[in-house]
C-alpha cells in the first residue's frame, strides 16, 4: 500500500486513506468475481488477497492524492518495493496457483517496458532482462557509494533489487510471468460511485443508497476480521446476501439500523442545549456521556432515514409524537413531586426523568419499528427532542432554558 499525500495532508491521513482504498477496492474485486466461492481478505498475504477458483490473487495497491500522479516505469520506487514483497513471499507460496497484480492510480509511463504486464500471457523475456539490468545498476551504485564513503542512493529501491536478484533464474521468470499491472485505477473518492454503477441489477432508485450502506457494512466486516470476531476472509456469498437483504428492505421501506454499533469520533459536536439540559439536573459524567453518544447515533440515523424516503421521514415525525406523549407522564410526576422552592428537589426529580429516558423508556415506549431492536434510537431521540425543547428533564427547564411554555 502506498499513499502519497499533497503537502496539505498529514501522513496519518494519507495512510488511513490508503488503507481505506484497499478495503473499498477489495469489495469491488469480490463483487466482480464470477466464482460463487470467491473470498477476499485485507492485509493477509498482501494488501488484498482474493481467492477464486483455486487461485490466490495477491495485489499491491498504490494510492495517491496527487492530481497527476507520477507515471510508473521500470525505475519507480513503487515497482521495486512491490517486487521485494513478492520475492520474499515466493518461498512460502505455491506460485503455480498464485497470481500477482500491481494496482496503481498512476498512469503507466509512455512506451514503458512494463506495458507487457497489462496483457496476461504476454512475452516478458525483454522485460525480465531489463529488470535484472536495473536491479544490478541499483546495487552497483549503492556499493560504489559505500566504497566512496558517501550517502548510499536508492534507499527505498535497493531492498527490492537485492531480493529480486537473490531469486533463482527460474523463480525470476516464474514471478514476472504471473504479474499484471493495472494502471490509472480510480482513486478512493470514486469507488463508492463505481460500486453504485456496478449494482445495475438493482432498481436505479436504490443504487446510491445501496452502495453507501454496503460500504458501511463492509467496513464493519473488515474491522471484525482484524479483531478475529469473524473469519479472516469475507466470502462473495456474504456480500450478495447483504445486497439482496438490503435491497429488499429498501424496497419495502423498512427502517434499517445503521448506527447502533457505531461510535462517534473522539472529538464530535454536541449541541450546547443538550449539555445545558444535563447540567440543569446535575447529571453525572457517565450519564451525560451516554446521552451525548446516543444523541449522535440517533441524529445521524434520523438524517439517513430522512434522505432515503419521505415515508421514512414521516415515521420519524409520528414516532416523535409518541415519544413526547410517553415523556409527559414522568415529567408531570417530577413537577408534582418537586418542591418548587428547593433547587435540590427540582434537580433530583428532573434527574429521574433523564434517567428514565436512558434506562426505562427503550422498553416502555417500544421501538419505532420491529427492525430496530437496539435502545440507542429511543435514548438518542429523546436527546434530540431535548435540544428542540420539546422534552426536558428539570421541572422548570422551559423557563430556565428559554423555551416557550
Image: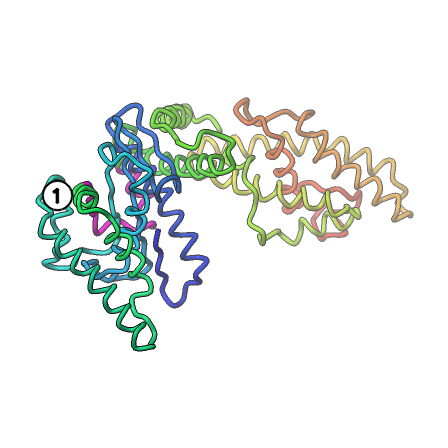
Q: Is residue 66 above or below residue 307?
A: below
Residue 191, magenta (yes or no): yes
The colour style of the image is rainbow
Would you say 218 lies left or right of 83 here? right
Q: Is residue 16 above or below residue 316?
A: below
Helix, strand or loop status at disc 1: loop
Q: Position of residue 217 (x, y in %)?
A: 44, 35
Residue 98, magenta (yes or no): no
Residue 123 or residue 118, whichever sits in front? 123
Q: Position of residue 102 (x, y in %)?
A: 25, 48
Query: Residue at the spot x=42%, y=25% of the render?
Result: 249
Q: Position of residue 316 (x, y in %)?
A: 54, 33
Find residue 392 and report its image quarter. top right
Query: Which residues fall within the magenta stretch?
Result: 178-197
Q: Position of residue 165 (x, y in %)?
A: 23, 54
Find residue 290 and report its image quarter. top right
The 10 Å Cα crowd at callout 1, few under 14, some 14 to 19, many 20 or more, is few
Find residue 321 and report its image quarter. top right
Residue 201 or residue 13, whichever sits in front? 13
Query: Residue at the spot x=28%, y=68% of the render?
Result: 142
Q: Which residue, given by chain and number where applicable, does mark 1 sit on?
A: 119
- Total of numbered circles in the picture? 1
Residue furthest toward the front? Answer: 147
Query: Residue at the spot x=91%, y=48% of the render?
Result: 341
Residue 192 or residue 360, whichever sits in front? 192
Amino acid at each position: 500500500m502506498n499513499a502519497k499525500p499533497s503537502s496539505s495532508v498529514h501522513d496519518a491521513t494519507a495512510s488511513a486513506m490508503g488503507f481505506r482504498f484497499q478495503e473499498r477496492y477489495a469489495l469491488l474485486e469480490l463483487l466482480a468475481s464470477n466464482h460463487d466461492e470467491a473470498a477476499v481478505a485485507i492485509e493477509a498475504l498482501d494488501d488484498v488477497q482474493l481467492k477464486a477458483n483455486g487461485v490466490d490473487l495477491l495485489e499491491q495497491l498504490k494510492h495517491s492524492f496527487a492530481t497527476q500522479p507520477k507515471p510508473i516505469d521500470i525505475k519507480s520506487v513503487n515497482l521495486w518495493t512491490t517486487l521485494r514483497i513478492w520475492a520474499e513471499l515466493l518461498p512460502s507460496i505455491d506460485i503455480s496457483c498464485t497470481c500477482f497484480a500491481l494496482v496503481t492510480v498512476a498512469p503507466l509511463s509512455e512506451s514503458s517496458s512494463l506495458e507487457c504486464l497489462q496483457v496476461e500471457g504476454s512475452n516478458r523475456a525483454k522485460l525480465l532482462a531489463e529488470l535484472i539490468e536495473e536491479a544490478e545498476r541499483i546495487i552497483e551504485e549503492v556499493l560504489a557509494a559505500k566504497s566512496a564513503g558517501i550517502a548510499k542512493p536508492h534507499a527505498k529501491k535497493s531492498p527490492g533489487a537485492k531480493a529480486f536478484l537473490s531469486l533463482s533464474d527460474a523463480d525470476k521468470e516464474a514471478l514476472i510471468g504471473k504479474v499484471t499491472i493495472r494502471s490509472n485505477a480510480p482513486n478512493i473518492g470514486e469507488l463508492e460511485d463505481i460500486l453504485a454503477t456496478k449494482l445495475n441489477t438493482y432498481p436505479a432508485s436504490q443504487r446510491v443508497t445501496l452502495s453507501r450502506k454496503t460500504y458501511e457494512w463492509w467496513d464493519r466486516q473488515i474491522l471484525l476480521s482484524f479483531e478475529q470476531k469473524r473469519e479472516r476472509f469475507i466470502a462473495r456469498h456474504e456480500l450478495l446476501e447483504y445486497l439482496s437483504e438490503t435491497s429488499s428492505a429498501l424496497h419495502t421501506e423498512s427502517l434499517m439500523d445503521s448506527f447502533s454499533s457505531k461510535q462517534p469520533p473522539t472529538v464530535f459536536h454536541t449541541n450546547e442545549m443538550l449539555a445545558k439540559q444535563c447540567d440543569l439536573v446535575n447529571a453525572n459524567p457517565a450519564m451525560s456521556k451516554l446521552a451525548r453518544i446516543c444523541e449522535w447515533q440517533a441524529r445521524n440515523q434520523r438524517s439517513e432515514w430522512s434522505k432515503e424516503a419521505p415515508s421514512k421521514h414521516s415515521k420519524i415525525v409520528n414516532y416523535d409524537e409518541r415519544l413526547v406523549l410517553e415523556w409527559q407522564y414522568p415529567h408531570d410526576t417530577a413537577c408534582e413531586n418537586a418542591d418548587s422552592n428547593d433547587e435540590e428537589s427540582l434537580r433530583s426529580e428532573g434527574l429521574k426523568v433523564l434517567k428514565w429516558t436512558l434506562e426505562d423508556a427503550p422498553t416502555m415506549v417500544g421501538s419505532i419499528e420491529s427492525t430496530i431492536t437496539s435502545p440507542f434510537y429511543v435514548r438518542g431521540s429523546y436527546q434530540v427532542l431535548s435540544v428542540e425543547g420539546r422534552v426536558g428533564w428539570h421541572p422548570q427547564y422551559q423557563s430556565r432554558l428559554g423555551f416557550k411554555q
